[in-house]
Image (spheres, rainbow, N blue to C red):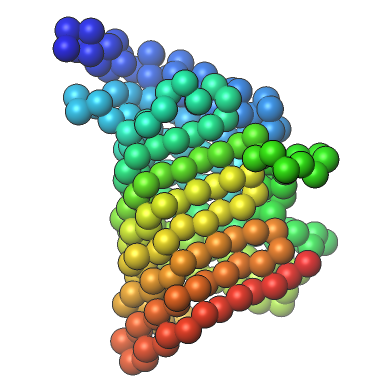
Amino acid sequence: MLLFLILFLILSIPSVQTRLGRYATDTINEDFHTNINIERIGLKINGDVKLGNILIRDYKTDTLVSIIELNTSIVNFSKLANGKLTFGDIDIKGLLFNIKTYKGENQTNLDVFVARFDEEEPSTEPSDFLLSSSDITIVNGKFTMSDENRETVQVLNFDGINLNATNFLINGSDVSTRINTLSFNDSRGLKMKNLSSNFKYTRENMLFDNLDIKTESSTLKGALEFKYN
């Protein structure tokens, strides 16, 4: 207990939090040529880790993801240095997720980002990069998607996003999770009361199994798949 209190006091020092933030991202950025920055890392009295001002830039140095505050518990510290980020519950505040296709390009900035985690040669071994969480909660987030090659650049603009998802996993470029609850407001007037689904994203498709959607005036149940090159 005494050791924990000493550690807690040390990690409460702003300069220490800043150094830890830089250390936590340097290895990943060097290995995968990404642009991920964490301004502060601190330890809460209950043992959880608090990350402040997270910023992920895309290959054009525009914002791909930004987070004001992220609170979580790290399940396995020994795997962090090897790019295996294993977390318990994650609570996120002030999320901005910005997917963009630039003029003259045919891939989104997200496609380019996740491609950094693909291995050059096919392998049956797991990808080097892995991030997992047992439970994720997002409060009042924002999601935008735009394409500068279209006449109408803005494709999607969701705000007021509230989400709870379990068994979240990023393994290389693949993403999977169980979406328990998801609500948001669309800029064109749609109000999503709730969406639940078993979700999976790969570079070839997006799957929404066991899909259940409720808006103010409709209900939809089924399965949905997006296929793309």
Quadrant in the picture for the C terminus: bottom right
- Percent coordinates x, y for residue 173 in the rendering: 65, 49
Q: Is residue 189 above or below residue 17?
A: below
**In the picture, residue 29 is in which quadrant?**
top right
- Percent coordinates x, y for residue 21 in the rendering: 46, 23
Farthest residue toward the bottom? 217
**In the picture, residue 130 is in which quadrant?**
top right
Number of dots carrying numbers? 0
The residue depicted at 58 percent of the width and 25 percent of the height is: 82
The residue depicted at 40 percent of the width and 37 percent of the height is: 87
- In the image, taking residue 7 as reference, residue 74 lies left or right, namely right
Farthest residue toward the front? 124
Q: Is residue 58 visible?
A: no
Q: Is residue 201 visible?
A: yes
- In the image, taking residue 64 as reference, residue 38 lies left or right, namely left
- Percent coordinates x, y for residue 125 in the rendering: 69, 39
**In-front residue for pair 82/185:** 82
- Percent coordinates x, y for residue 19 in the rendering: 46, 16
Q: Is residue 29 above or below residue 138?
A: above
- In the image, taking residue 33 as reference, residue 225 lies left or right, namely left
Q: Is residue 31 above or below residue 23?
A: below
- In the image, taking residue 115 as reference, residue 179 lies left or right, namely left
Quadrant in the picture for the N terminus: top left
The residue depicted at 38 percent of the width and 14 percent of the height is: 15
The residue depicted at 65 percent of the width and 40 percent of the height is: 126
Farthest residue toward the left? 1
**In-front residue for pair 65/175:** 175
